[in-house]
């Protein structure tokens, strides 16, 4: 079946998928080195970005079942990356709080990702770096508008 899309659209989509796949595979290898799973790292990213959250809020942001998120938080808590903390205003509410060790792990993983990207960019003419960034920003902006 012949596609109704222009060749450049097909090629851009394929390249984006290929790049995302490489990032995903490299990310999984990095996370194995640090002893956490991709969903656990996603939880650290969300907690770092959004602050303390209830397990319900965290499960919604992770698109995981409440019970799965509870197990995930249990493992992160045992590893010393997060802790459960009762809400000061409503003692019935328990929030998941990112601990210093969790922040450090988050930063180590991002640094490792950035080091990998830097190693790739070193083989590309520095004048091209800004062009790459400009195109990515443009794509991100346009995709965020829809």
Image (cartoon, grey):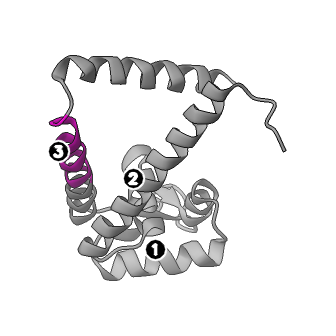
Is residue 62 left or right of 135 when viewed as pictured? Answer: right
Residue with the mark numbered 1: 73
Q: Position of residue 104 (x, y in %)?
A: 20, 58
Check contact, mark 2 vs mark 1: CB within 8 A: no
Disc 3 is placed on an element classified as helix
Disc 1 is placed on an element classified as helix
Look at the magenta stretch and give its main secondary structure. Answer: helix
Is residue 119 left or right of 49 when viewed as pictured? Answer: left
Q: Which mark is residue 23?
A: 2
| Residue 40: quadrant of the picture | bottom left
In this rendering, is residue 70 above or below 100?
below
Residue 92 vs residue 40, the one in the foreground: 40
Q: Residue at x 41, y 72 (%)?
A: 37
The magenta segment = 110-123
Label 2, label 3: how far apart the Cα atoms are? 14 Å
Residue with the mark numbered 3: 119
Is 118 inside the magenta-drawn segment?
Answer: yes
Q: Residue at x 52, y 81 (%)?
A: 71
Disc 2 is placed on an element classified as helix
Q: Residue at x 64, y 57 (%)?
A: 60
Residue 135 vs residue 32, the one in the foreground: 135
Q: Position of residue 3 (x, y in %)?
A: 79, 36
Instruction: Specify few, some or many for label 1: CA neighbours under 10 Å numbering under 14, 14-19, or 20 or more.
Output: many
């Amino acid at each position: 079946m012949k596609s109704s899309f222009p060749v450049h659209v097909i090629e851009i989509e394929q390249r984006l998928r290929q790049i995302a796949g490489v990032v995903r595979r490299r990310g999984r290898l990095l996370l194995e080195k640090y002893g956490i799973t991709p969903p656990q790292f996603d939880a650290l990213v969300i907690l770092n970005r959004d602050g303390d959250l209830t397990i319900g809020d965290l499960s919604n942001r992770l698109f995981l079942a409440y019970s799965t998120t509870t197990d995930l938080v249990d493992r992160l808590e045992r590893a010393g990356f997060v802790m459960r903390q009762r809400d000061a205003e409503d003692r019935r509410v328990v929030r998941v709080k990112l601990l210093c060790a969790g922040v450090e792990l988050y930063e180590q993983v991002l640094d490792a990702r950035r080091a990998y990207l830097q190693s790739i960019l070193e083989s590309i003419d520095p004048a091209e770096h800004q062009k790459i960034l400009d195109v990515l920003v443009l794509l991100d902006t346009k995709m965020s508008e829809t």
